[in-house]
Each structure stands twice: as structure tokens, then as C-alpha cells.
Image (cartoon, rainbow, N blue to C red):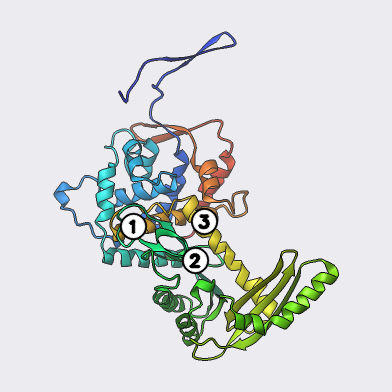
């Protein structure tokens, strides 16, 4: 099929006037709002840091698309909702994406093709990945200037289903699927990702968590020497090595425990009391206590907070281990349960930014893809930061994409300017203008 069609198309009539369409509208895009990402990139040196982390193994005489352009094309495409490399076949000539990626929309050559991007993703080595991890943390420091009083680290794992013969794809009994098992660490207060690690599919939730946290804690203490650091995690991370690490580093922690008979026995009286109150009032009852407890694998006794809840559906008991000296209910309600926001951030990464589209064969290439999607998430985090106080301050990535990025526009070049003629009927013009102004004025 020809890609250029000058034939007029008829759609009948309206109030006596013929409705006629053609494909002669010029260089038109549906993603003009993505220029906000270009401005964020310029402001924070976003892709510069990524490019500096990677070693370009190509011979200079054969290079058509430089490293920085490839990075911009890939990350901006992911952020705009085009997560598959195959999308580049049609997007490589999109005038907005070309402008965002550092190419002139009309007179410059098109962006990279899918095979070029595939080779790019598969060229990354272990040293590159370590440097990318360092840059992700450096970006955190840039966007979280000190001093800091409290830093909350939320660590969590998730599943990433795999297909075909992908390296280190294994069956996981809990998830009942062949998968990878990514690990994430977020700032529990701001929601910024500090680390992302791809792991084989058959690993335990806590696998490599000590190494990741040890590195982060060391760097956080150096950057924020006065800050109190708190670690939160679910029962998948209730392993002695994490308790010992936190205690050695003087880090506060609160980590879920898997319910067992010994724990139930220690809180049996409290649950009976909650049941009695429920039967009297027919309203849900929640009671809390704490006690010293030592599992067989622990080297010493530790404090356990117990929640005894009784409601229409019956009992609901929860236990967490902690070294925080606060009242049990405060520890549970005001600290621990807030880690649920991290689960929402991981869902946003997977559902809105498609961080589970790790479809390369090579494991290292898929780790690189996980970084690309995580950096795309950081773009949305930066955009939300510059939207504080507006109706979109807490919007999900999909909402931000729909309302601020998906703007129809005609793009043209003149001798002195690149003109972006956005749709006159765009309903969020004031919000878009305010966001751009804030980004330009943001400290760097």
C-alpha cells in the first residue's frame, strides 16, 4: 500500500455541504505535549546521564544515530505509550518525536528503525548496567536536595511473565507462571524509584535485597548524614539477614511476618477480646499489642507487633517485626500500612508504562529495558512534581499522557523557527502553559 495518498475521501454531506478529507495536512502529530518531556530532559540532564553511563561499541564511521538520540527516542516513545520497538517503524518520522529526540522535524533524517533499536538494547553490558544504577540514584539526589529528616525505603518484588526461550526465565510456584522476578526500591515518601533489579524467575522475593539495600544505605548516609532511615517491606522480606543489616547500620525497620501457630498463640487472648467486643457491638474491632519473639532462624529476640482484627468475615491477624519504639497501633497504622503506595507505583509501572514488556532473549538486554521503563516513570514523576497544587498533581501516568501529552499539532520549519501549531480546541491549555513555566523555573 502506498504511504502517500492525495486522493480526496468523501464522507457524505452535512447541512448541504460535502464532507471531504485528504492526506495533505502536512506534518501532523498526536503527541505534541511530549515536548514537556524534552524540557524536563534539558532541565535535569536526564538523557545526558544515561548516555554517559553507556559505552558505544560501534565504529564512528558507521554511526548514523548517535547514542543520545537513540536513548531519547526509546525513552520518550515508552513514556508516550509506544512501548514496543516495532512501533518505531511508523514513529521514526513523527515530527514531535523527532523534535523531542534532537532532530529537525522536516529537514533531518528519520529516527532509528526497529532493528537499530534492537541492536542498541542488546549491546549493553554489565558495566553499563551498573553505571545506569548509579545514575538512577544520582538523579534521586538531584531531585531530593538535602537536608532530610526522614527517608523511608520501600522494597518490593513483582512478577513479570515471560514467553519463549528467554534467558533465566523460570517457573515460580507462588505466581504459577514462567517469569522474571524484578526487585524495586522506592522512596516511600516521594515515590521516586531508587533501584530496579531484574532477577531470574525462580528466586525468592528477598534475593539480592541485602546487597541492593547495603549499597543504597551507604550512599544515603553519605548524602544525608542527619537523616533517619526507615525500611518497610512485606513478609517476602522477613529474613534474618535484612534484620541484621538494619541493626548493624542503625536503620529502623518494619517488616511483615508470615503468620504461624506460635504467633497466633501469643496473640490468642487479644483476638478473643476482639471477638467478644465484635459480638457485643457487631462492628469491626481492631486491637494491637507487641511482644518479644524469636524464630528458630533468628540469632536473638526481636519485637513483634500484632494486630487482632475481628469482623463479619471472621478473624484477621497480622504481624510485623520492628525495632521502632512506638505504640503498636502507631507502628502499624501510621507507618507500615502506608507501604501499600509502593504496590500502586509498581502497578503504574507495569500497567501504564508497560515495564513488564521485557521481551528480549538476552537477560542483560531485559535488565536494560527495565531501566528504560523506570527512567520513563521518572519523567512522569518529574512532571507530577511540577504539577503540585493542580488538578493533576496526583494523576496516574495514563491520565497525564491523555490530558497533557496527547495533543494534536501541525509542525513546520521556517528559516528561523520550528513551529508547533497545537490544536485550538485543546481543553488544558492553561494547565499545559503553567506546567511548562514551572519546569523552566525549576531549580537544577
| Residue underneath mark 2 | 186
Q: What element carries label 1?
A: helix
| Residue underneath mark 1 | 366
Q: Position of residue 369 (x, y in %)?
A: 35, 55
| Residue underneath mark 3 | 347
Question: Which mark is nearer the camera, 3 or 2?
Answer: 3
Picture layout, residue 383 above or below residue 429: below
Rate crowding at label 3 as few (under 14), some (14 to 19) or many (20 or more) other CA atoms within 10 Å: some
Rate crowding at label 2 as few (under 14), some (14 to 19) or many (20 or more) other CA atoms within 10 Å: many
For the point 34% across and 20% down, the residue is: 5
Give the camera-side residue of 244 and 301. Answer: 301
Question: Which mark is nearer the camera, 2 or 1?
Answer: 1
Q: Position of residue 290 (x, y in %)?
A: 66, 84
Using the rendered view, name the quadrant where residue 45 is placed. Answer: bottom left
Q: Can residue 440 be seen in the rendering of this structure?
A: no
Give the camera-side residue of 142 and 413. Answer: 142
For the point 32% across and 41% down, the residue is: 103
Amino acid at each position: 500500500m502506498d504511504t502517500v495518498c492525495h486522493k480526496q475521501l468523501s464522507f457524505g454531506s452535512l447541512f448541504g455541504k460535502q464532507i471531504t478529507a485528504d492526506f495533505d495536512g502536512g506534518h501532523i502529530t498526536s503527541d505534541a505535549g511530549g515536548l514537556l518531556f524534552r524540557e524536563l530532559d534539558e532541565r535535569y540532564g536526564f538523557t545526558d546521564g544515561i548516555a554517559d553511563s553507556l559505552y558505544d561499541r560501534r565504529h564512528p564511521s558507521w554511526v548514523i544515530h548517535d547514542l543520545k538520540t537513540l536513548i531519547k527516542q526509546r525513552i520518550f516513545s515508552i513514556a508516550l505509550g509506544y512501548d514496543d520497538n516495532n512501533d518505531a517503524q511508523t514513529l521514526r518520522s513523527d515530527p514531535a518525536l523527532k523534535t523531542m529526540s534532537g532532530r529537525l522535524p522536516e529537514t533531518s533524517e528519520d529516527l532509528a528503525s526497529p532493528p537499530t533499536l534492537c541492536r542498541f538494547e542488546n549491546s549493553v553490558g554489565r558495566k553499563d548496567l551498573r553505571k545506569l544504577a548509579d545514575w538512577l540514584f544520582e538523579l534521586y539526589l538531584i531531585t531530593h536536595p538535602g537536608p532530610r529528616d526522614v527517608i523511608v525505603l520501600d522494597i518490593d518484588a513483582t512478577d513479570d511473565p515471560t514467553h519463549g526461550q528467554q534467558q533465566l526465565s523460570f517457573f515460580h510456584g507462588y505466581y504459577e507462571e514462567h517469569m522474571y522476578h524484578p526487585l524495586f526500591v522506592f522512596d516511600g515518601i516521594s515515590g521516586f524509584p531508587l533501584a530496579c533489579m531484574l532477577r531470574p524467575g525462580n528466586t525468592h522475593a528477598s534475593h539480592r535485597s541485602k546487597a541492593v539495600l547495603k549499597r543504597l544505605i551507604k550512599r544515603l548516609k553519605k548524602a544525608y548524614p542527619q537523616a533517619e532511615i526507615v525500611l518497610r517491606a512485606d513478609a517476602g522480606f522477613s529474613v534474618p539477614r535484612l534484620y541484621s543489616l538494619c541493626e548493624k547500620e542503625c536503620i529502623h525497620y518494619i517488616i511483615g511476618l508470615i503468620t504461624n501457630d506460635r504467633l497466633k498463640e501469643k496473640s490468642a487472648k487479644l483476638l478473643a477480646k476482639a471477638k467478644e467486643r465484635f459480638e457485643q457491638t457487631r462492628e469491626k474491632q481492631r486491637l494491637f499489642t507487641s511482644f518479644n519473639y524469636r524464630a528458630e532462624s533468628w540469632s536473638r529476640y526481636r519485637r513483634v507487633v500484632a494486630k487482632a482484627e475481628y469482623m463479619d468475615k471472621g478473624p484477621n491477624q497480622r504481624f510485623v517485626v520492628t525495632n521502632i519504639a512506638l505504640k503498636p497501633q502507631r507502628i502499624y497504622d501510621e507507618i507500615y500500612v502506608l507501604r501499600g503506595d509502593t504496590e500502586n507505583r509498581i502497578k503504574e509501572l507495569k500497567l501504564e508504562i508497560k515495564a513488564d514488556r521485557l521481551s528480549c532473549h538476552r537477560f542483560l538486554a531485559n535488565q536494560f529495558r527495565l531501566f528504560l521503563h523506570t527512567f520513563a516513570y521518572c519523567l512522569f514523576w518529574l512532571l507530577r512534581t511540577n504539577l503540585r497544587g493542580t488538578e493533576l498533581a496526583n494523576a496516574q501516568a495514563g491520565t497525564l499522557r491523555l490530558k497533557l501529552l496527547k495533543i494534536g499539532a501541525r509542525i513546520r520549519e521556517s528559516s528561523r523557527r520550528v513551529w508547533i501549531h497545537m490544536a485550538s480546541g485543546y481543553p488544558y491549555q492553561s494547565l499545559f502553559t503553567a506546567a511548562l513555566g514551572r519546569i523552566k523555573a525549576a531549580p537544577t
